Structure formats: C-alpha cells, structure tokens
Image (cartoon, grey):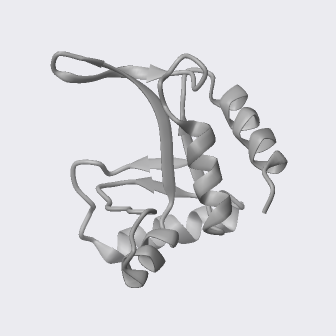
Amino acid sequence: MELEWVQMVPKNVEHIEAIGQKAKNLGIVLTIHAPYYVNLNAKDRAILAASKKRILDFSGIAYGEKGEKHHLTLRESDAKWKEFLTVLKKRKIGGVLVVESPVQEEDVLLLQKAFAKLKS
C-alpha cells in the first residue's frame, strides 16, 4: 500500500508511527510517495549509500505541454527499464520498487522476470 505525501510529509510523528504500526500489525508493506532525491549514478559514496536505502518509484510517463499527463505501460513508454534494472543489479540495490502503470501487475511481473534473468 502506498501513501501519497507528494506535496507535504505530515509533521505529526506520533500519527505517522501509529500508521506504520497498524500496517505492520496487519502484515502490510507500506510505502510513502513523497518528495525524494535519489541518485544511483552518484560517485560520492555517501550519496550512493543514502540513495540505496530509498523506496524506488518507477513508471513510464506520457508528457504534454504542461508536464506529466498520465502513466503508460512500460512497453508503451520510452522508459529505459532494462537499463534501470541493470543498474539495480550491478549496484546491488534492493528494497521496494513501486511501479505506477495502468497494468501494474503485468509490469511488475515483467520487471521481476527481466531482473531474474540478469547476471550478477
């Protein structure tokens, strides 16, 4: 389950911790869609280490004159998802990958199968 905190992360720490505990009690993997800064190509080891600890969000996006219009399937998009998986494997990056797609389950399976075929 993903919480949408893109515009602002709530400041009530007790409330956030209660949400996290409830999810844990229910066996739900909880992710947060919030402002973040990730650089998996960083040469600075501290930045790379911090980036490896983040939840990753990946999607194909259709753009218009005013920016993002909607999400696309990975196969329809120009997202370089095979290259993205190669970087994850090469840099031994693990964690939760959130896939935003109109066919979420299909694209998740596509990524899982492609990732499993990559050589270490």
- In the picture, measured across the screen, residue 51 lies left or right of residue 96, that is left
Q: Residue at x 39, y 69 (%)?
A: 42
Where does residue 26 sit, x and y in percent of width and height?
69, 60
Looking at the image, can residue 94 be seen? no
Q: Nearer the viewer, residue 106 or 15?
A: 106
Q: Is residue 20 left or right of residue 114?
A: left
How many tags in the picture?
0
Quadrant placement of the C terminus = bottom right
Residue at x-position 83% and y-position 46%: 117
What percent of the width, then of the height, locates residue 111?
70, 39
| Picture residue at 48% right of the left edge, 47% below the top | 57
Direction bottom: furthest residue? 46
Q: Residue at x 16, y 21 (%)?
A: 66
Q: Quadrant of residue 14?
A: bottom left
Image check: 93 left or right of 115?
left
Residue 92 spot, x, y in % from top left: 66, 69
Q: Is residue 52 visible?
A: yes
Asked if residue 35 is positioned above or below residue 44 in the image, the reply reads: above
Q: Is residue 54 above or below residue 30?
A: below
